[in-house]
Amino acid sequence: MMSKADQIFEELIRPIESRMIKIVWRIVLDPEEAEDVFQDILAQIWAKLVVILRHPTPHAYILRICVTKSYDALRRRSRRQRYEVFLETIKSQLLPVYPNELMGAFDQKSAMRAAIALLPRKQGQAILLRVMDDAPYASIGAVLGCSEETARSHFSKGKARLKKILARMGVLVR
């Protein structure tokens, strides 16, 4: 005798399981990440089971979950890659940091993340836009709702404040 969960899986997931896997693999393109995404999808299906069962086309709803979760994974990967590039740019252009001289449990990434979070909002955004996106000051000003000169000022003040914050955290900067 099948349990209720097994019965739901056989009726709801099994008929479209191969399509679900193909969608995830074609979008994500990384086998390990695709497996993680597929597990997240199954967890979300279980969490939304009542809604899915009431939906007029539950299989379409499930396939939509597959597409959405897969693209979410791509966005996370892209953000992770941009953040890695950002950290390298910060280290090389703005803050020459002496490696392995960090205070306490902070590694360079968490120290940088914490320091940027402590900046005033516009200064932090100016730093991120300038360093991560290589945005011109005019564009930064448009995003921040200020002039190009003010955007330069936000960046400059943010850079100086960022150095001070990192120095207080025990990160040595030149």
Image: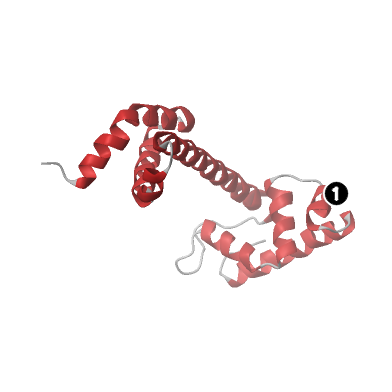
Q: Quadrant of the N terminus?
A: top left
Q: Is residue 35 left or right of residue 142?
A: left
**Residue at 81% over, 46% down:** 136
Q: Is residue 136 above or below residue 16?
A: below
169, above or below 48, in the image: below
Query: What is the quadrant of residue 17 in the picture?
Result: top left
- Residue 140 spot, x, y in % from top left: 79, 52
Image coords of residue 8 (percent x, y): 26, 41
* Residue at 88% over, 54% down: 148
Percent across and percent down for residue 155 are 77, 58
Q: Which image quadrant is residue 30 in?
A: top left
Q: Nearer the viewer, residue 71 or 142?
A: 71
Vertical placement of residue 154 versus 26, above or below: below
Instruction: Indicate left or right for 153 with 78 as reference.
Output: right
Rendered position, 163 above or below 36: below
Q: Secondary structure at mark 1?
A: helix
Q: Residue lying at the far bottom in this picture: please name it.
A: 168
Residue labelled with disc 1: 138
Residue 134, image x, y percentages: 73, 44
Q: Callout 1: 10 Å neighbours few (<14), some, many (20+)? A: some
